[in-house]
Structure formats: structure tokens, C-alpha cells
Image (cartoon, grey):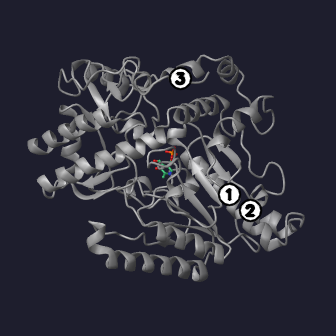
Amino acid sequence: MGSASFSSAADLQSTLLAGEPNGPSIKTAIPGPKAKAVADNLGEVFDTRALNMLADYRKSHGNYIVDPDGNTLLDVYAQIASIPVGYNNPALLAAAKSDDMLQALINRPALGNFPSVEWATILRTGILKAAPPGLNQVFTALAGSDANETAYKAAFMWRRQKERGGPSVEFTEAEMDTCMTNAGPGAPNLSILSFKSAFHGRLFGSLSTTRSKPIHKLDIPAFDWPRATFPELKYPLEEHAEENAKAEADSLAEVEDLILNFHAPPAAVVVEPIQSEGGDNHASPAFFRGLREITRKHGVLFIVDEVQTGVGATGKFWAHEHWDLPFPPDMVTFSKKAQTAGYYFSDPELRPNKPYRQFNTWMGDPARAIIARAIIEYIENNDLVAQTARVGDYLYGKFETLAAKYPGQFANLRGKGQGTFIAFDNPKRDEFLLKAKTFGVNIGGSGANAVRLRPMLIFQEKHADILIEALENTVKAL
Ligand SMILES: Cc1ncc(COP(=O)(O)O)c(C=O)c1O
């Protein structure tokens, strides 16, 4: 396993883009006849109503995704922001073929009970090597929602343990009884505070903190937990500095009020560095420093959900590194481009006082952790976070030009200085996304009107040029 060392910048470029086509090529309507036949067949055994496009992953390389009809698209959606270093990346192929991987796949351990002799090394040389500053422990999980839910559970147990008087204080009989009947005296009356338009996942607990779209939540019983207003910034930022600062101050005041007065006190505040599914909503570093300060002041944990923003796309490995926090977050959750999931923390008291309190069968997956290690190594060896910052600045500049040329079509352009994590609003967003495919670009939306860019970390200036030309053609054709 491991990536090659490179003797020159040219070697690096060619290796990064090994097997990539020179550009998009569109041969049929999308879906074309072959894709339609595959979809019909699939539809008999699997729900295809959310189908975006069918892919032939064997033929997809680097930044390009290929469909069954041979249409080749520049992919800046990347499996909902989840492909870090390109399709069929040679370093990941090598990791997949390694002996470690074979072992992990055919002898999958129940990690809490039977971890392998290699597990500590896999963590230390992989997931933990990329730990956010100040955090040195990890709890591994299966998906973003699972990462958040387990972080919430850790927060509740931490809080009750403190209230009880420490890790050595035993549970009362009343606590043991009420937890089995789900109610009664001594039942924990606690919550997780999240924000309007937030997305933290769709499992039962995480869903109660998700506030982006009703379709995610309809018919599912939810906890009565507090929801604070996320500041709605106006663009361009320079022209609305005063209003935006007020929106952020109001939001922080609301958070503090909810912490102090909500009938079920929050054990934690959870926030995305950029609200992603909710429409790519940004806030300033000062806002997030304010959140850190308020949570710390009131003994409430600060959970940063980096499931979508983490692993390089914002031009820092973790988006919260843009904030210059005086104290690290208490927990940082991750998944998507890490290709594995979990939460980082450092306070040993966030490990519950007894075994089996935070536990499940798999507790993560060594096979995915091995891929995560290969990804992290590849990113480091090729300096892809710095590349993403550089390409992002280049791309943002191109979008500024487009926005000036086509007023209203690239509205509320956001993500300046945030790598390639760029978005804008378009009045005909859904049509825009479909039309972009006809010009060879696979691009996603979020929230009501946003077009969001989620290129991989191997996206370079030449891909940015292709993207900009295709999106200009898209707008002209709308
Ligand atoms: C910020 C954030 N948190 C959590 C999740 C949930 O992750 P998963 O779909 O892997 O459960 C997502 C998914 O889009 C997300 O964007």
C-alpha cells in the first residue's frame, strides 16, 4: 500500500490523473437506451425513484464518471461529496489488494469485543493521523448519521455522569427502572441543540437534529429538542457586513437563551461548519468562536459535524480549522470523503464509565479504515489540501466573472477562501442540474435553490476551466 513518490510536478500531475479522459463526452441523451434498460431491470428489485444517473464504475476514472451509454461527465457531485481522490485511484486500488484488506474483508471483527492485533496501528497510521488539532481519540462508526448519534450518546452519558458526581458514582435503582420503562422519575431530561436548516442524518436520534426538509422527517416521531436560528447571511458579504454581524449576534443570543431556558437542557450543541444539505449556508469564523465560547461557558459540549465539510474540500483538512478556535471542539464527527465514519474527541470522560454503554456489533469497519488510511496518505503525499485551496481560489474567481456576466444566474455566490466548497443560487435550479448533464457535467443541488460544488481533491485548474465553460453553456441554454 501507499502512494508512489514523485520526482517532478509533471509526474505528480500525470499520476494524479492516471486514466482520465481529456474532457467530457456526451453521446446520447441521459439516460440513454442502455441506461434505461439497466434502470428498468434494477427497478424490479430496488427502489429507483431517487435515481440520478447510472454509472459504470469500471470505466470511470479520476474526476470523470461514465454511464452505461458511454457518456463521460466531469463529476463535481462525487457521490454526494464522498469521493476524495478520484474513481479507480491507483493508491486505493493497491490498498484494496493488500493483505491487510483481505483479512479485514473476510474476517470482519466485532471491534469492541475482538479487535485484531493490527487495529491500533490501522487507527494510528490512518484516521488518527488526520485527527483535528487537539483531539487524539476516535470512536469509529458506520455512517455519518451513526457518527452523530454515537456522539450524542457520549454527550448525554458525559452530562449525566457529571450531574451524578463522577464516573465512580453508581446508578440509582430509579435510574435503572426508568431507563427500562422509557419514562418516570429520574429519566434524563436532556437535549441536543441544532440549527434551522441543519442536516445531521436520518437515523432515529440524528433525525431529531436534522431540520432541512420535511421529506426527511415526515411520520417519524422526534424528540422535542431546541432549534436555534442559523444566521442567514446576505451576499456579497462586504456589502452587508453590519446586517450579517447582527444576524450572527442574534443567533448566538438565541443559542444562549435556549441553553439556559429550554425545558430539556442541551447536553451539546451540534453544528455544521457550512450547512450543506440545507443549502450551503455559511457563517463567519467569529460566529463559530462565539458558539465555542457560549458552550464552554455553560458546560455544554460543542460537536462539529464535519461529515460533509471534512477531508480537505474547504482548503483545510477540517473546515473548523478556518475558525482559529481558542479551544478545540469537544467532538468532531466525520464520514463521506473519509470513507469511514466516527467522532474524534480528547476528554477521557467522553468514554462512558462502563463498557458496553457505547457499543454495537461492528463499531466501524477495518476494511473502510484501511481505505481511509490510503486516502489520508495519498492526500498528504500529493499535498491535495493545499491544491484544493489554490484551485478553489482560481475557480471562485471564474465564478465571480460569470456572476457579473449573467446577473441572477449565479446568485449569492459563496465559499470564497473555502477551497472548492463553492455554491450559488439559480432561479431554475432543478432545470440547471439536468441541463448541465447535457454539457457533460454531473453537479448537485442542495436546499431550495442552491447549486453546490463538491469536486474531488484531484480537481485542478484545467477541470475548473471545463466546468466553467459547461456551466456558462448551461445558463445560456436555460
Ligand atoms: C453534515 C452531515 N451530517 C450527517 C450526514 C449523514 O451522513 P450519512 O448519510 O452517511 O448517514 C450528512 C449526509 O449528507 C451530512 O451532510
Q: Nearer the viewer, residue 446 or 286?
A: 286
Of callouts 1 and 3, the N-terminal one = 3
Q: Nearer the viewer, mark 3 or mark 2?
A: 3
Marks 3 & 2, CB-CB < 8 Å contact: no
Residue identified by numbered label 3: 91
Number of residues whose C-alpha sits closer than 10 Å to that of mark 2, classed few (under 14), some (14–19) or many (20 or more): many
Above or below, comparing residue 57 to residue 380 in the picture: above
Left or right of 17, for residue 53: left
Q: Residue at x 38, y 49 (%)?
A: 421
Of callouts 3 and 2, the N-terminal one = 3
Residue identified by numbered label 2: 157
Work out how far the residue at label 3 is from the one at label 2, CA to CA, in angstroms.
40 Å
**Rendering coords of residue 48 (x, y %):** 35, 33
Work out how far the residue at label 1 is from the one at label 2, CA to CA, in angstroms.
6 Å
Number of residues whose C-alpha sits closer than 10 Å to that of mark 1, classed few (under 14), some (14–19) or many (20 or more): some
**Rendering coords of residue 458 (x, y %):** 41, 33
Residue at the far front: name it: 8
Residue identified by numbered label 1: 153
Q: Residue at x 56, y 47 (%)?
A: 334
